[in-house]
Structure formats: C-alpha cells, structure tokens
Image (tube, helix red, strand yellow):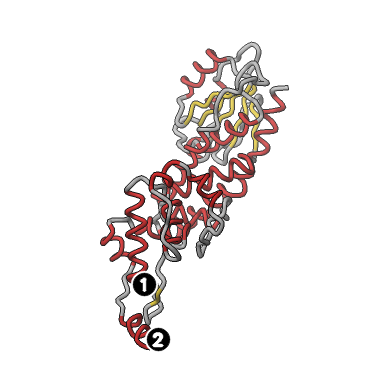
Amino acid sequence: MGEQSQVTTEEEPGYGIGAVARRLGVPAPTLRTWNLRYGLGPSRRSPGGHRRYDLSDLRRLEEMNRLIRTGVPAADAAREVLRGDEAPSAVSLQDLREVPEEREAREEHPPIASEPRPEIPTVAMLTRAAIMLDSQLVSDWIGAALSRHGVVWTWEELVIPVFETICRRQAETGASIEVEHLFSDRLLASLSRLVERPARPINVRPVLLTCSEEEQHSLPIYALAAALTAEHVETRVLGARIPYPALADAMRRLGPAVVFVWSQLPETGDPAPLASLPLLRPASRVIVGGTGWWDDLPPSVSRVTSFRDALTQISAALH
C-alpha cells in the first residue's frame, strides 16, 4: 500500500507558480504573499530543485480563493484551509465574517504556518514585500511599526534602509521604479493618517512644512509632521513643489512659528529665494533640511542634517 502511494506521488504532475496563477486567476505576487504569510505554498520540488505545486496544494489554493471571493478575510480563509487538512470545519462563513476575534479565542489549537508573519518586519522582509508589489503587506507592516515604535524609529530603522536598498537595486539594474513608487505611496498613506490637529496643541502658531520649489520628494516633511503631531505640535503641510511666492502667501496668512523647507536634489536647493521670504512680526524661524541645499544660506536660516536634529530645532523654536 505504501509503495503504491509513493508511485502515485512521484507521478503526480507539479505546477509552477505561473501556471497556478493562470489557473486560479490570482496574480503570482498574491500567491507568494499567501505562502509568506500563511504557509500556503508549493510542497514539492522538481528534479531540478524548483518548487512546484501538487494537486493537494492546488485544492488548498482553490479553497482559499473561493473563501476570499465569498467575503472571508484572507487570514481567516487561510486558517480554515489549513485546519481543513486536519479535520472538517464546524465554523460557518457567517461566523468567519462577523466574529473572527471570538472564534480565535475558542480555537485551542490554531494551525501554525511554515513562515509565521511577524508583527514588525525586518528591513529585508519589508523590502521583499515592496519588490513583490504587495501593497497590503507593506501597509500592514509600516502601520505595525508606527504603532509600536513611533515615527522616528520607523523612519530611521525601517524606511531609510528600505529606500537605500531599493535605490541600490535601481542603480544596479535600471529597474524598480515601480517598487519605489508603491513603497512611497503606502508610506505616505500611513504617515498622512497620523497628521492631524492635536486636541490641545502646545503651540499657538503652527509649524509650516514644505518642499522647495520643484522638489518632488515630500515624504520627509510628512514624517516630520507625523512625529510633531505625536508631540502635540500643530503643523501645516504644503507638500511638494511649492513656488516661493505661494510659500510667502501662506506665511502671511498663517504667521507660523517655524517654516521648514526640504530640498533633496541639488537642482532644487538654490537658497537665494529664501532671502525674499516675508519678515513677519513676530518673526518666523526658517529651517532647511535635505542634501539638496547649496552653501551660502541666508544668515537667518538654519540648516539641519538629520531627522532628529530637525525635531530638536523645531521644538526649541517653539519654547
């Protein structure tokens, strides 16, 4: 009996991820995500060492896909698929949709995926998720890091290293622009949710955050705004490519305590227009950051060289 089973297994066809994606109508990056998150991946290897899906794997993925299409969250669908390998499920689809927390509390022996998904990713894991264009996983992991460790830690320990890895990949291959854009989009969405007017701001006059004229890299000012919001500082973010006349108008209307201007590229770092910003009463402290700024800043303008330095100088200007 064992010999017959072994022969059947060896003769059973194996399927590559492209064939499985076409058969299920599920993108290959999604299949890789299901493997990474839930352990629903190929269980065989070809004689050449390539991973292959067998018929049992296909049945699991078909059930996973079916459950998701009926409205079951992916994590709950995977749990049911994995548990189905051991015993028939007694949980209804309605239970899955409506009370996942209660159901998890009742489960005494939840299945363990081969690669459990950590709450906080490593740099390599977050980079891999971005390369796979898994926007949901990137969002989840950035959000988890922001919730647990805050903006400064997430920016310094995750965001900057991931961007450095992506930029190296671009330099080596000439590709991955789409990876940078997806990661930037998900990061901006996560940071924007944290930027709001504090219930009891510590500053009467807001902090105005903007990019220099034609500067498109605006993520640093959103990160600063999110970090300042956490410290109960009220901010206004103007975003990318702000003409200096528009910045001057905003200063006159808001009377900010601090104006922070970001320049990342040398083409956007001419400091001459800073000298023509309006002189308000009370005065606004002008601070610049980024590697784009040229030398010879106006005497009244301060330069910061790091994220923490920017937070420190802005905070000092408010007290």
Farthest residue, direction front: 90
Image quadrant where one finds the C terminus: top right
Under circle 2, the secondary element is helix
Q: Percent from the top left, x then y, of residue 21? A: 30, 60
Name the side, left or right, on which 318 lies relative to 224: right
Q: Percent from the top left, x then y, of residue 148? A: 62, 43
Q: 137 or 153, which lies in front?
A: 137
The residue tagged 2 is 2
Badges 1 and 2: C-beta atoms under 8 Å apart? no
Q: Percent from the top left, x then y, of residue 318? A: 69, 22
Q: Amino acid at mark 2?
A: Gly
Image quadrant where one finds the N terminus: bottom left
For marks 1 and 2, the one nearer the N-term is 2
Under circle 1, the secondary element is strand
The residue tagged 1 is 52
Q: Amino acid at mark 1?
A: Arg
**In the rendered image of this protein, does residue 99 appear above or below residue 114?**
above
Q: Percent from the top left, x then y, of residue 35? A: 44, 61
Q: CA distance from mark 1 to mark 2?
A: 23 Å
